[in-house]
Image (cartoon, rainbow, N blue to C red):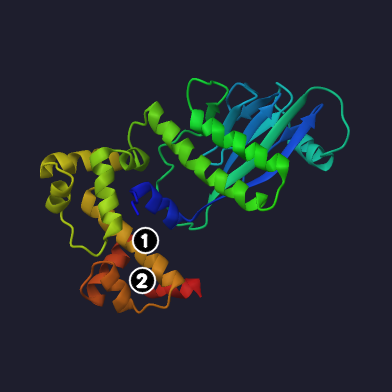
Amino acid sequence: MYTDALSDILKWLRLKAEVYLHTDFQGCWAVDTSGSRSVPFHLVHSGRSWLHLQDEAPRLLSAGDLVIFPHDAQHYLSSESHCPNAELVEQTMAQLGAPAQGEVTGLTCGHFMFENKADWPLLDSLPAVIVLELSDTSRLGNTRALLQLLIAELEEQGAGTSLAVDYIAHVLFIHILRSQLEKGLPSGLLKALFSPQVGKALTLIHADIAKPWTLASLASAVGMSRAVFAAEFKSLTGKTAIAYLSEWRMLTAAELLQTTDLTLFDISERCGYQSEAAFRKAFKHVTGKTPGEVRRAAD
């Protein structure tokens, strides 16, 4: 089965998605889902809502708008154009489902999270807030179809709905990443992943980290000269290809140390090192910790 570098990274990060609220708000209300150290998102599936961010003017969201916070930015969604407060948020949640009067707004709220908490710069190049106007039928058709399927599952509440919703949200995250690339990211790992040649090199590295890759062999494998490949790789990712290879090897090694009982020798071999001593030295250099420290912390 074909795989690619983005899929590899999302598997390694153990991307999870959850929808925890799908309801109608009426009257004066406000919600705030920031502070969870995840990536919150909200879909306005009916009515309208005001988005409030620190130091920015309020933004009106309409039915079909999807808003995502890649860095968990502090925010409010509210019925009011003036910024609400935490007290109104608490009041809103306490009275959820109670009869009210006024305009109705339907919201679906959830978050994306990574079970693997290791620092990996997948989202670094993304803005603090992303708003996708899915009511625009001329673009993002597949993303809009995903949202329609998500809402249908939530409304139907059939057998398997909980798992189906999480899987749909998982695919939605990938669509969000693609949408930002189409807008034009200046650089960063995300742009590199979608680059035809650098992305291919990343996929090759992930597929066989034990292989003794060199700058020359990677460049040859993707059909570029050594110098052009080196410059393109660093321009997009901010690091050399060999530095990336070393970091990915050590991230893989850390995962194996934490989740398996493999010996240090076996992990060394899987990560492309011929001796434990060389592996220990590289691991300490990249992670700042010894393999033993990482393994003991997982116990």
Dot 2: what SS?
Answer: loop
What x and y, as percent, mark residue 285? Answer: 29, 63
Q: In this view, does 296 lie to the left or right of 290?
A: right
Dot 1: what SS?
Answer: helix
Is 198 or 148 nearer to us in this picture?
A: 148
The residue tagged 2 is 290
253 relative to 187, above or below: below
12 relative to 19, above or below: below
Residue visible at 71% across and 29% down in the picture: 78
The residue tagged 1 is 251
Q: Can residue 254 be seen in this view?
A: yes
Residue visible at 27% across and 61% down in the picture: 209
1 relative to 82, above or below: below
Quadrant of res 232:
top left
Marks 2 and 1 sit apart, C-alpha to C-alpha, by: 13 Å
16 relative to 99, above or below: below
- Numbered label attached to residue 280: none
Q: Can residue 129 be seen in this view?
A: no
Q: Is residue 199 left or right of residue 295?
A: left
Q: Which mark lies nearer to you, 2 or 1?
A: 1
- Upstream in sequence: badge 2 or badge 1: 1
Query: Most extreme residue toward the right, as rendered?
Result: 99
Q: What residue type is labelled 2?
A: Thr
Q: Is residue 241 left or right of residue 73?
A: left
Q: Is the residue marked by circle 2 packed among few (<14), some (14-19), or many (20+) residues within 10 Å?
A: some
What x and y, as percent, mark residue 262? Answer: 38, 77
Q: Is residue 203 left or right of residue 87?
A: left
Q: What residue type is labelled 1?
A: Leu
What x and y, as percent, mark residue 247? Answer: 31, 57
Residue visible at 52% across and 40% down in the picture: 172
Quadrant of res 185:
top left
- Tell me the quadrant of the picture where the N terminus can be found: bottom left
